[in-house]
Image: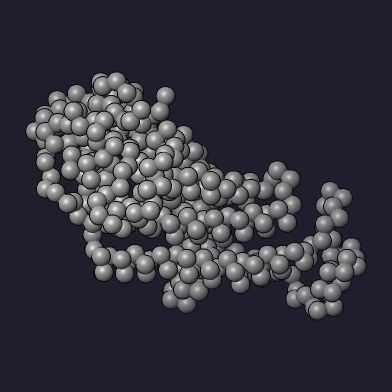
Amino acid sequence: MNLLTVQAPGRVPHSGRGLALGIWRFMLVALVLVLSLGFTHVAVAQADPDREMTTAAPGITADQWRQVRSGETGPNYRDSRADSNYNLINSSGETWRQIRNRWVSPFGLIAVFGMVAIITLFYLIIGRKKLGEPRTGRKLFRWSLLIRSLHWTVATLFITLALTGLNLLFGKFVFRGLFGDAVWGWMISASKVLHNYLGPIFGVLLVILLISLIKDNIPKKHDLQWFKKGGGLVGKGHPDAGFANGGEKAWYWLLATAGIVVIASGFVLDFPNYGQSRDTMQWANIIHAVGALGLTAVALGHIYIGTVGTEGSLEAMTTGYVDETWAKEHHNLWYEEVKDQAISEEELAARKAGGSGEPSAAKPS
């Protein structure tokens, strides 16, 4: 059964509220653990600042590189552990570095900051999309406490991973010059630990959220019309939309495809003790970076539309309820299915004060 709703009206079981609170408690404990690991990692790294210099390999000459690329490397350039015959000087690492530095990093930066520029121009020129009619004051239930808890947990982890990932990729060009090596060393160590330990938690919770919402995001014919009208920006009137409109479904399936690829490549990088070669790790790093930067850019648009960009959208994911006018304008097909379940603000306040729980949000069949 979809965790979001059930068809029959009724109250949400106390187990749903308990599960949501349990998720928040688990995340709090996990966050404390990760922070403690981060501080320990930084302390160990700073305990012996000369350790890296004393173990650093000398510079590689052009002749040595030619030996490596031609395969004429001797035992001094091979890993002898466990009868390995793998080059310590891996020429494919230079290919990985060139792809990352010449293509992934610059174009990823263009994608992310380009999206910021587009959103800013859109807001300045077109402005916030306001409701076309006055609010009725009657509310329709849309999101359960469990789904809202999952959404905000996943969203918080996504933002944390995006910021730490951007810091790992670009931070040295900004913060190292601004704050110096000491502060930069702490920032990069903390970012690395947070990214590595929060990533698997994000992956698991995202999969749970995607499974919970899959029934609401099956593509329908009217979704094509939604895209043709640009979500209501082209032509008159708002295009038809069910519980989820075409844009929301596109974001869902992007997370369900590119998001899963990012999670899978992240697990390859997080757990290198399952026989992955260095070549595999390098390609996983490229795939992870490309997917994560692309998702970050698109997520900025999702965040804008769901907050300041559209009047009434944020209320759905903070309170669980939306105004009748918002439902009619943005999800008219869903509104026709549930309009008889609308309640007044007074009734909603009395229901919350009485602790009667949340009703089930009906959806189109």
Q: Which image quadrant: the C terminus?
A: top left
Q: Residue at x 31, y 30 (%)?
A: 363
Question: Residue 295 in the image: x percent, y percent?
Answer: 47, 55
Query: Looking at this rendering, what residue extends furthest in the bottom direction?
Result: 62
User: Viewed as shown, does residue 329 lie left or right of 354?
Assistant: right
The image quadrant of residue 61 is: bottom right
Question: Residue 43 in the image: x percent, y percent?
Answer: 52, 58
Q: Residue at x 74, y 45 (%)?
A: 275
Query: Measured along the vertical axis of the image, is residue 222 above or below residue 282?
Result: above
Question: Which of these two is toward me, 15 or 327?
Answer: 327
Say whether residue 169 is visible.
yes
Q: Which image quadrant: the N terminus?
A: top left
Q: Residue at x 82, y 61 (%)?
A: 87
Query: Measured along the vertical axis of the image, is residue 127 above or below residue 80?
Result: below
Query: Measured along the vertical axis of the image, is residue 10 above or below residue 138?
Result: above
Q: What is the number of callouts on the image?
A: 0
User: Viewed as shown, does residue 228 lie left or right of 8?
Assistant: right
Task: State the scheme by which the image is colored.
Answer: one colour
Q: Residue at x 77, y 75 (%)?
A: 60
Say whether residue 171 is visible.
no
Question: Residue 206 in the image: x percent, y percent?
Answer: 46, 41
Question: Which of these two is toward me, 316 or 183?
Answer: 316
User: Viewed as shown, does residue 344 lie left or right of 56?
Assistant: left
Question: Residue 45 in the image: x percent, y percent?
Answer: 57, 60
